Image: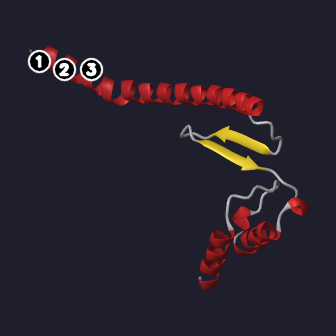
Amino acid sequence: MIKTTRSLSEHRIWLEEYFSAGVENIEKHVMESLRRYFNNQFQLWFEILVEDPALRVKVNENFTAQISRERDYLQLSGGERTCYGIMISSSPVFVSLELTLHCNIGSAILMFLMNSLS
């Protein structure tokens, strides 16, 4: 009886400390592998179906599609230029090497006002 209890206790410790962590690690790697494969296939089909070379798409770690449009600064409308200028002046985090706008003028003004007050 004591031997069985000790053996069960050792198995429980092994399951809790090693097996669960191992399964989580395997799951994380399998999901990342699936996400990369899905991302590649999604990008391939997106480029075939949507014939706009300025559009870029990717799938993030939550399997959510993110679509962005790359545009030259000179091609932006006046409102888009204002939005981009406010973003740059209010937070250096938004400055990137490629020009991708994910805001509207209202959110840019709100962000500017919030940063001005702090």
Amino acid type of the residue that numbered disc 3 sits on in the rendered structure: His
Residue 11 has which mark?
Answer: 3
Residue at which label 1 appears: 2
Q: Where residue 65 sits in the image (x, y, percent)?
A: 61, 41
Q: Quadrant of residue 36?
A: top right
- Mark 3 element type: helix
Q: Can you name the residue that lies furthest to the left here? A: 1
Residue 6 has which mark?
Answer: 2
What is the image's colouring?
secondary structure
Horizontal side of 61 relative to 91 (left or right) equals: left
Q: CA distance from mark 1 to mark 2?
A: 6 Å
User: For the point 15% across and 15% down, which residue is it?
Assistant: 4
- The quarter of the image holding the N terminus is top left
Q: Can you name the residue that lies furthest to the bottom here? A: 117
Amino acid type of the residue that numbered disc 1 sits on in the rendered structure: Ile
Q: CA distance from mark 1 to mark 3?
A: 14 Å
Asked whether disc 1 touches disc 2, contact meaning CB atoms under 8 Å apart, the reply is: yes
Q: Where residue 57 sits in the image (x, y, percent)?
A: 70, 40
